[in-house]
Amino acid sequence: MRAKFIIYLSVILFCAINTMAQNKIASIPFKKGEELKFRVHYGLINAGEATITVDDKLHEIESSECYQINVFGRTTGPFDWVLRVRDTWRTFIDKNSVTAVKFYRHIEEGNYFTEETTYFDRERNIATVTERKRNGYKKFNKEYSIEEYTQDLISGFYYIRALDFNNLSPGELIPVNTFFEDTFYKAEVKYLGTEEIKTKFGKKNTHVFTPIIPNNELFENGANTIMVYYSDDKNKIPLKIKASMFIGAIECDLRSYKGLSERL
């Protein structure tokens, strides 16, 4: 199995919070220049950090004007001694529909390396993937069938922020369409309602979501294994993520931000 830390990081931050496009976008709560920085920790031990930014200009991809979202993840402290991770993830999402147009990732996890680009053909419902390994070998333009409204791991994170949380009812199940590497996934995310939590920025009201995930080497199966807490304001940013893993509980907390639509 590949680097467990970055699988954890990507699943928690992105895959766990993808959502369906059948829900209508309420408004776009983010803007160009937004930056979110997270601290990942196992108890008092720092495990890693992640920075998510919205580029300060729009990009034209496949005739669509797109937001460029950049994600940089790395291990820190003792985790960095055991398994060095330096990852870059990037998505281009249509500025109107907030759906994936292009996805890129550069992964360095210990001795593992890959560089991958995915284009989403939303008319034919095809994902086209090109991959490069460390030795320079490339797999060219391999096509995979997807379904309508499919998101990548990053675009789904921003799509859910654009939904109207007030139209969701506690216990409601949200279907998920996600494509990653070479596989199309359908799953569900459960909306749990609102909760007040303690953060670095004081007590905040949040909307809580949990993915229903299959049994695997990292997470126990079922709901409430991963809990994602979005701010109950116009920003709708994740303030905290908690994961119950077989090795124990790991948390991801927002530690700094800038460029929000409104003050947190």
Image (cartoon, rainbow, N blue to C red):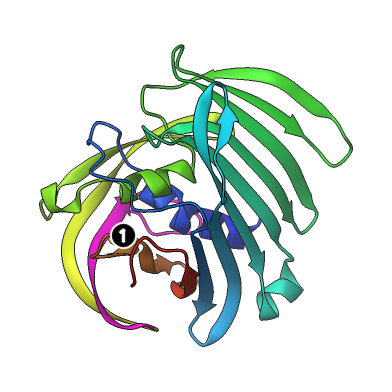
Residue 215 visible? no
Q: Residue at x 63, y 39 (%)?
A: 104
Given residues 134 and 56, the one toward you in this image is 56
Residue 158 x, y percent position in the rendering = 40, 48
Position of 220 with respect to 68 (left or right) is left
Q: Residue at x 19, y 52 (%)?
A: 165
Q: Residue furthest right?
A: 135
Residue 214 belongs to magenta span: yes
Is the residue 10 above or below the residue 199 in the image? Answer: above
Residue 50 x, y percent position in the rendering = 57, 65
Residue 103 belongs to magenta span: no
Position of 133 with respect to 235 (left or right) is right
- Residue 142 image-quadrant placement: top right
Residue 43 visible? yes
Residue 45 x, y percent position in the rendering = 57, 84
Residue to which mark 1 is pinned: 236
What SS does tag 1 mark? Answer: loop
Segment tinted magenta in the rendering: 201-222
Is the residue 32 above or below the residue 204 in the image? Answer: above
Is the residue 140 above or below the residue 14 in the image? Answer: above
Given residues 121 and 92, the one toward you in this image is 92
Residue 126 x, y percent position in the rendering = 51, 17
